[in-house]
Image (tube, rainbow, N blue to C red):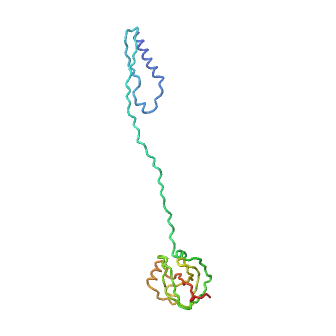
Amino acid sequence: MIQRILWFAVMLLALAGCGQPLQLDAARRTRTPLLAQSTTLTGTPERATIVLETPRITQTPIQTPPPTIARSPTVQIIPATPEPQTSEARWRAQQIDRQVLDPPQLYRVTSQATLFWYDPMTGQILEIGTLRGDVPVQARFRLRSTGQAALEVPYRINNDFGLTAISEAVRSRMEAAGYTVSVEAFLLESDAVQAP
């Protein structure tokens, strides 16, 4: 009879575990079972009582990884760099209402007039020298800085209009701006400069 009761107790314990839900997460798998499978028999064999011991529940701390901080993508702003202007483009930027004379026209300078050159590297207007006589004019315009009417004259450095010994400082600045053979110089319009 005792064997039957023991067999019955074992079967009862085996069946008690069949209705449990599956434990899927890792935290639950590390816990100890809720019921201990030890039994104690009390009383006489005819009136035996099965007492189930309540197990102690011990939990292992769940290790959670540190939170990952989502970094927003960085935006890098690169300002647009303007393309460097050529010396000629800088010179053209100083001219307002430019009118090209094609073919160039021969103007007559009746009294001495100053021939100027715009230095595109420094933005200064430099005096090349004074001239008199006939000069070819290739364009008419107004100076942006003063609004004065002017005439564009091609000038071969140290060669044209009797200006063969210009200042060494002016010549060096012409070379620094990229002009070694000729430049576009200009005269201011005046009574001394007559159109053809």
Counting every numbered tag in the picture gives: 0
**Image quadrant of residue 32?**
top left
Residue 181 lies, in percent from the top left, at 50, 82
Q: Where residue 194 sits in the image (x, y, percent)?
A: 59, 88
In the picture, measured across the screen, residue 174 lies left or right of residue 194, that is left
Which quadrant would the N terminus be assigned to in this image?
top left
Q: Is residue 154 left or right of residue 74?
A: right
Relative to 60, residue 111 above or below: below
Quarter placement of the C terminus: bottom right
Name the one closer to the observer, 81 or 40: 81
- Of the pair 149 and 129, the residue shown nearer to us: 149
> Could you tell whether 99 is left or right of 76 in the image?
right
Left or right of 52? Residue 140 is right
**Nearer the observer, 137 or 158:** 137
| Image location (x, y in percent) of residue 164 | 48, 89
User: Percent x, y for residue 29?
Assistant: 42, 30
